[in-house]
Amino acid sequence: MTSPAGRADLASFTDYAAAVTAAVSAAGAYYGDGSTPLGDDDYDALVRAIEAWEQQHPDEVHPDSPTGKVAGGAAVGDVPHSVPMLSLENVFSDEELTHWAAGLERRLGRPVDGWCVEPKLDGLAVAARYQQGRLVQMLTRGDGLAGEDITHAADAVLGLPARLAEPLDVELRGEVLLTGDQFEAANEIRTAHGATPFAHPRSGAAGTLRAKDRPYRVELTFFAYGAVGFGDLGHSALLEALAALGANTAASTDAAPLRCASVEQVRQRIEEITAMRGSLPFGIDGVVVKADSAQDQQQAGSGSRAPRWAVARKLAAQHQVTRLLDVEWNVGRTGIIAPRAVLEPVVIDGVTVTYATLHNPADITRRDLMIGDLCFVLRAGDVIPRVEAPLADQRTGAEKPIVFPEVCPRCGDSIDASEQRWRCVRGRGCQAVASILYAAGRDQLDIEGLGRTRAVQLVDAGLVADMADLFTLDKARLLTLERMGEVSADNLLAAIETARGAALNRVFCALGVRGTGRTMSRRISAHFGSMAAIRAADAETLAAVDGIGTEKARMVVAELTELAPVLDKLIAAGVGTTVTEPAAAPAAVGEGEETGPLASKGVVVTGAMTGPLATLSRNEMNELIERAGGKASGSVSKRTALLVAGEKAGSKRAKAEELGIQILTPEEFADLVADYLP
Ligand code: IVH
């Protein structure tokens, strides 16, 4: 990107002036329609560079400079605010936060009497005026002194009651945003009406609030975090009072505002909220720390831009803008043809992102993406990054349409484009070799001697079309294959025979049912107990399995229906009749049992296993944990009770230490679960 953003130092007045122009235009877009060619991190970096230059050249400060101005100097709206709508100072690290808190306490001449820590919601600030408890006007923040009247949009804002529980004259202040679900719904309805999808939930919220006379309705959500004309309540007491009046507050979410006694506790809560970020149903771009007591707030007072008693601990942006370089089409194991975006590498929250998911062709069309577009990329937590939308107004004319495949890129057969997700007409057949290799893998049927070459031979010779056919092979037919001698044939048949006795969960996992990995396969198998029962399952019975929601249950049923012929062949061949594994385990419990030495404990394994566990794959370790009553998980969190840390354990160990989680060596763990070892 050719913006001055990210540049640490501005070398000359020309650079400085260019940076001011870029920042003013970005702030205008941000506070105008919510769009911006700069990511939040870039904007913040730009403003900091401007500030640094101004400190060194105080006589040359540009009159348009965004520093020290509410809304970065962007002016919109003409309805005066009753009391200015201020912004927040930002801090970007724990050190800066500690420094800020110490400054506030110095100013007060005493320790702060409690902090309140809450999410910084990534939406738009609004003021909602009530008379006699009735909502009469809603305003944007505008430049902080005057805003735009957006009362017409109030009906569509959930959490902002038309009538309060009491007939008060009061002004609520808070953030209006699109939750993740609302964003998806908004884009669906927009595209159905031929409108371009919103690039980003915040621009969507801004656009929706300002739009009038749209032929469709887009719902938004309000979170109150302040009020004017509500007496001298401290912050947490105020939030409670606002909720009692019927307004939505962040108390309704997992990241509820929390009173903290010390800066150390504040830091911990910030960490907790940060850790939840990926799973919250709405975007946050930081955590707000406020002196909680009314007395501290009054005594600290406010500057022209921001209160002195509150600060935003900014988090790295999860959205960044980068260029879409290409689109690849990959055929999955089930024949799904999935587009994948190749991006100009961009760092999002410390991770370099080069690829991102594009979901499906309809999604590409809906988002109106083109090769060469600048686009928003979202990377939330550990999920796969995804391309959200292009910045269509940044187009140069050099962008090229994305070419959709006309035939299956893997086998050249036709494409079934009747569903949103395109599929090769051969379905799994397109990937017969890949499916068979997957089924034969170590964590599934573990059929030694069935590598790629053999799988290709078997498929090409028409001996095997799916994994169930493996169990019908005989020596005579195997010997017809090239380079297949007596010994190899015997060995392969013996390995297949062993696989016939594999536990049900492994056989089920080997089917590669979409939406079910190893853990889910174990749960489903333990729940139903036989392949026949699984085959007969409907969405309702499947939804009773821990971790399967209605949506996933429906998908699994569709998969099972498609796989019915394979399931029938497996049942006929007596494959998957072993339910628990291994039979020698004393408790011989299924998954979900809450007995055993690990009774319901969350256990994570990291690093290389040694001693009695040296030969176990990760999947076998997970099976061991679940046999011993525990819950295996891939990542360390507050719910983790135990970390098994082998050699070369890295970040998971560090995180467990930080959280004070018990850590065992593989040998110590083997002792603990000795009765359950395979
Ligand atoms: S308090 C006088 N609390 O962040 C107090 N603001 O960057 C000023 N915001 O303009 C605001 N979540 O739009 C406050 N929990 C929260 C917030 C929050 C989001 C927004 C708000 C504000 C902006 C400043």
Image (cartoon, grey):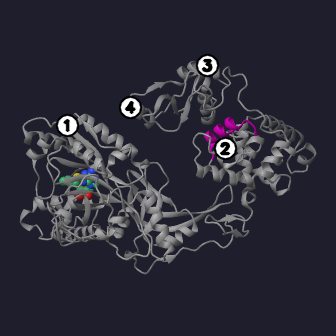
Which amino acid type is marked by label 3? Ala
The residue indicated by pointer 2 is 541
Label 3–label 4 contact, CB within 8 A = no
Kindly indicate the quadrant of the structure image that contains residue 524. top right
Measure the C-alpha gap from mark 3 to mark 1.
49 Å
- Quarter of the figure that contains the C terminus: top right
Within 10 angstroms of label 3, few (less than 14), some, or many (20 or more) residues? some
The residue indicated by pointer 4 is 659
From the viewer's perspective, is residue 608 above or below residue 671? below
First of labels 3, 4 by sequence position: 4
Residue 35 in view: no
Q: Quadrant of ligand 1?
A: bottom left
Residue at 37% across, 75% down: 394
First of labels 3, 1 by sequence position: 1
Task: Tell me the element at label 4.
Answer: helix
First of labels 3, 2 by sequence position: 2
First of labels 2, 1 by sequence position: 1
Q: Main secondary structure of the magenta part?
A: helix
Measure the C-alpha gap from mark 3 to mark 4.
27 Å
Q: Which mark is residue 674?
A: 3
